[in-house]
Amino acid sequence: MKIVVALGGNAILQRGEEGSAEEQFAHVTSAVARLVDLVSRGETILITHGNGPQVGDILLKNECAAETLPRMPLDVCGAESQGMIGYMLQQCMENALRARGIERSVISIITQTRVNPLDPAFSHPSKPIGPFFTREEADAHVREQGWSMHETGGGDARFRRVVPSPEPLDIIEHSSIGALSDEGFIVIAAGGGGIPVYRTAEGALRGIEAVVDKDLAAEKLATGIGADILLILTDVPGVYLHYRTPEQRLLADVTVQDVCTWLAEDRFAEGSMAPKMRACMRFVEGGGQKAIITSLDLVDQALEGTVGTRIIR
Ligand code: ADP
Ligand code: MG
């Protein structure tokens, strides 16, 4: 079975943590322990991951060093975060496999995700990223960097940069990723949704200031390489209908048609569960066998079909 595993932000860094390398290595070590079980059972896995907290830290470093060093554009920051997280996953996974006597190589691929520069998202930047700024700082960024800023929360520093979150069209490296996976490598790819790029009229690739949702990119990767299962691992046991209300109900087996109806009725939160459900729906519609949403610690039972939310045809 070919499984694309999408690891949520919590698998690497948890809210409120300092973000030290030690903390991140510790989380990655326990996350990969679950994935090694899949490999030992003979499944072919490809790993993708979020990068929100890490890219946030990189952007903050950009600001702290702005007097001395040029700010790196968002695509370069995304690449940096893929390298950093990919390295941690790659090393921890290799160590975990070795400890279990499994001889497999793990490789991370710096991955670009193609978007349409005419995507309507570019006229409505909506995804908050990086540090908080005061009104004066925010005004300066609008003037000097041309950023879009959004006012959030309270306090003095309550402005944040917002960037477009366009739809992913395809994964530029999908054939190399597929070939490496077919060769037996455990591939880590499309981290943070991939680096958003577009093609110029001449066909050249160029980075663009945007963020692609990691679950939507995971679907493009999974469909692109012909995976059987899309496994989205987050910090809840599954998807709830009427989430956080007295009628809350955990969904088990649901059809693409159900998901399509619920999405049209806006039943899931944008920015968290809606993109996951959209990704699962597209994956199954695109020929995938099933998509599963569950938490990292329930992987085994979820694949057996006893827990989690499964989206099937
Ligand atoms: P990840 O880093 O894994 O992508 P997200 O925070 O984007 O994590 O999405 C997971 C979160 O979605 C959960 O922590 C939960 O609070 C939230 N959530 C929103 N709506 C739902 C829902 N209908 N069912 C379950 N969880 C939901
Ligand atoms: Mg998310």
Image (cartoon, rainbow, N blue to C red):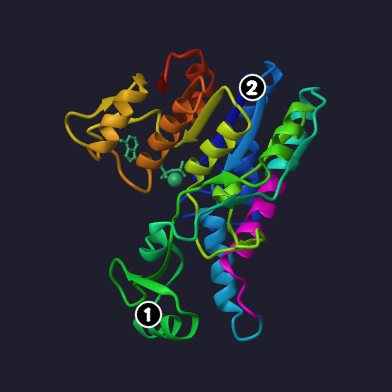
199 left or right of 116 in image: right
Position of 123 relative to 284 (above/below)? below
Label 1, residues with CA under 10 Å away: few <14, some 14-19, many ≥20: some
Name the residue: 49% across, 33% down: 232
Name the residue: 42% across, 81% down: 142
Q: Nearer the viewer, residue 295 or 193?
A: 193
Position of 92 relative to 3 (above/below)? below
Q: Secondary structure at mark 2?
A: helix
Q: Position of residue 123 (x, y in %)?
A: 37, 65
Label 2, residues with CA under 10 Å away: few <14, some 14-19, many ≥20: some
Q: Which quadrant of the rendered structure holds the N terminus? A: top right
Q: Is residue 267 visible?
A: no
* Residue 298: mark: none
Q: Which residues are magenta?
A: 70-88
Q: Which quadrant of the rendered structure holds the C terminus? A: top left
Identify the amino acid type marked 1. Thr
Q: Which residue is mark 1?
A: 134
Name the residue: 36% across, 24% down: 256
Locate ligand 1 by image quadrant: top left
User: Which of the 4 image quarters holds residue 186?
Assistant: top right
Q: Which residue is mark 2?
A: 38
183 left or right of 313 in image: right
The tally of labels here is 2
The reply to whether the magenta stretch includes residue 69 is no
Q: Nearer the viewer, residue 141 or 38?
A: 141
